[in-house]
Structures are given as C-alpha cells and as structure tokens.
Amino acid sequence: MADHHVGNLVLTDLVKRYENTDPAARPAVDGVSLDVEAGEFLTLLGPSGCGKTTTLRMVAGFETPTSGTISLDGADMLRLPPNKRPMAMVFQSYALFPHLSVFENVAYGLRIDRVRRARLEEAVEIALTSMNLTGLGERFPHQLSGGQQQRVALARAMVVQPSVLLFDEPLSNLDAKFREQMRREIRLLQRRMGITSLYVTHDQAEAMSLSDRIVVMNAGRVEQVATPAEVYTRPASVFVGNFVGRASFLPVSGVVVRGGRGGVSVFGKEVEVAADPGVGSSGVVMVRPESVVVSPVFEQGCGVVRSAVYLGAGVDYEVETDQGTVLASVGDPDVGGLLEEGTKVGLEVDASRVYLLPRGGGGGGCLASCWCSPPLAEPGPRCAIVSMPCPHLSRR
C-alpha cells in the first residue's frame, strides 16, 4: 500500500447528552479532551457504559456531540459526514457484506472512491497479503473463520489509507487463542504502517499489549491518560487501580508524605512507598498480588490462607490479614506443596511495587476484580475504600 497521511486527532471538551434523558443525569460523555499524536496507538479503556464507544462514534461521525470539538490536523471534523472523514473503522461484528467475496469486501471503499481498476487490484492484493489472506480472495465471509473475517475487516480498513484508524472492540467475538494472535498482528501492522489509531476495549490485556497510551474512562469522564506501565504502577485513582489488573487496597492512617514518598505500615512492617501527591494524613495502599511474598513461617505480618487457586504457571492465594483480605500471586509453584486453607503464613511486600493513594481517590465502587479490606461499617459488607456495598465481599 502506498504512503498515506498520518493525522493528529484532537478532542476538546466533548459532551454527549442523549435526548429524553433526565437533565440532572450525568451525560454519556462528560467533557472528554484528548490529543492523539500522529502515529500513536491510543486505547479507550473502561467498563460498559463508561462512554468509550460513544466517544469513538462521535469521532467517526456516527454520533453528534452535544458540545465540544473534534479536529484532525487542525481541520474541523464536525463539518464533515462520516464518509468524508479520512478515517476507517473496524467493528466488533466485522460488518462484512455477506454477498460479496473477500476481494470485493476489501475493495469496497476503493470502488466508492472510484479508484482505477489496475491500482485497485494491486492495492487489494497487497492488503490481502499483509493480513495473511493470500488465496482467499474468491471466498465469501461465511466460508471463513472468525479470525479470518476479522482480518478481512482490517484489510478493508487499511486499504483506503486512512489518516486515522478506529477500532470498536474488534476482538471480543474471538476465542482467547485467536484474540491473543490478533492482538500481536494488529500491533505489528499498526507499527509498520504508522497509522494513528483509536481503539476501544474493556479488556485490560488488549489495552496493555496494544497501546502507546491508555485512556481510562469512568462514568463518561477521563480518569487517567498514561502509558500502560504508568496506569498499572501509578494509577490516578482507586478506580483505575481496581480496573486495570488486580490489587488489594489496604486503608492506612498517620501517613507522612515527603518528596513523593510516604511511610506506611503493611503487614506489620514499616515501609516507605511511592505516594500520590493528593495523599493526606490517611490513604489507601495499593498492593499488586505479584508484590506479595508468602512464607510458610508464621511471624509478624502474618495471615491465614482462605483459598488457593492453581493456575499452572502460578498459584493465587487469598490471605486474610489484620489489614484486610490480600491476594498474593506466587509463580512456579510446587504442586505438591500448595498451602492449604487455614494455613497460617508470613507475608512481606516489595515496597518498590506498592503505591499510596488518597482514601476514596477516584470514582466508582468496588469491582468484582478487586480484593477489598474488611467492611468499615454495618450493615452488610462494604468496600473499605469508597464505603459502598461491595458485591465481591457479599459473595463470601
């Protein structure tokens, strides 16, 4: 495929409020501003209903913003209908034409643009080859696997040489093996072609493996924009830490923060950890499961094993401590030596991989993936961070 223009996409104060909704309700998209650099792969990540797909559809032109602007290299995109925007979209459902062959599906956009036959055929063949679809041009969508259909959808988007490529959860219909394979292929193709890409997903693994930067959204707003490593190790809020990866959140008090670091007690030991600038005298310690060291020696910083889940490459222990329930992930376990439920153990933490957040720092409540501390108040189990009903604890 020939060289193409790579665009700088800018969203400014985007708001989308649907008609016939309560005027007092929060908009579906509430003041989203983003600057997607030319050639960057940016992912919108968040739970269902957070506004990520609505944001993508506004960029594509399928939804009209209530207010705000969308520009590409300084040009106002809101003045253009979807078919006039220099963008292409890959859909969750593939959106292939069932009555057209693979070749004609890929060629569709070029035919709309009235590209000459010789150039069209050359471009389509190059696109099919780049997506490992050589020899499948005469087949129809129903004759292809799900992974092959998604490759056709990608080839159709790439062949028109868009300035911006949009992805709406394109891998959610694939099984785990093909999902992982397609993640690698999408990232390699995007890097090779350098197309500015905006990707929507609720899958953390997709976001972490594909993205230059991740935009974590919640309730229509942006919680954090950062690299995958920054989002994972230095989340901007409890919500972000909860949603991206697994973590235990332990409330602490009497905190003194100096120079971006705070002294806290974790598992009965005083440690110094990196701290969010907004932490006051009390906060919440985020502990990732891989940072917890489990010892069969019962000592200070002890806990009691409540469950053990063998995962092949590792084992997850749920350990009850005085500070709350903690998830510990142990790699390369001895299958014959797994700790049983009720075993008393010692715990230590790698302080370099712990982060101190403000108490209640961030919107949203306790997600099913979190590992909460004991309830702060009755009645019923409540999340120690945000003091709201916690479905995870309620199931115990």
Image (cartoon, rainbow, N blue to C red):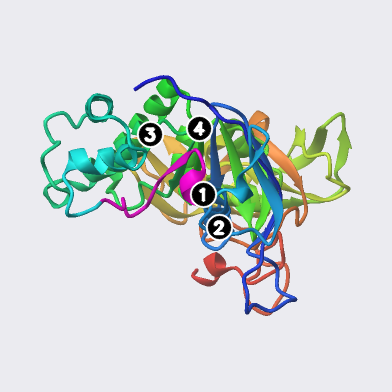
Label 3 and label 2: CA atoms lie apart by 24 Å
User: In this rendering, is residue 65 above or below 223?
Assistant: below
Could you tell me which residue is drawn at 56 percent across and 60 percent down?
Answer: 367
Residue range (magenta): 81-96
| Amino acid type assigned to the residue bearing label 2 in the image | Thr
Tell which circle, 2 or 4, labels the residue nearer the N-terminal end: 2
| Amino acid type assigned to the residue bearing label 1 in the image | Ala
Residues at circles 4 and 3 in contact by the CB criterion of under 8 Å:
no
* Secondary structure found at label 2: helix
Q: Nearer the viewer, mark 3 or mark 2?
A: 3
* Secondary structure found at label 3: loop
Label 2 packing within 10 angstroms: few (<14), some (14-19), many (20+)? many
Mark 4 = which residue? 163
Q: Which of the two residues, 156 or 183, is positioned nearer the viewer here?
A: 156
Task: Please provide percent x and percent y for residue 75.
Answer: 65, 37
Q: Which of the two residues, 69 or 325, is positioned nearer the viewer here?
A: 69
Tell which circle, 2 or 1, labels the residue nearer the N-terminal end: 2
Mark 2 = which residue? 54
| Amino acid type assigned to the residue bearing label 3 in the image | Val
Residues at circles 3 and 2 in contact by the CB criterion of under 8 Å:
no
Residues at circles 2 and 4 in contact by the CB criterion of under 8 Å:
no
388 with respect to 134 (left or right): right
Label 4 and label 3: CA atoms lie apart by 9 Å
Mark 3 = which residue? 160
* Secondary structure found at label 1: helix
Mark 1 = which residue? 60
Q: Nearer the viewer, mark 3 or mark 1?
A: 3
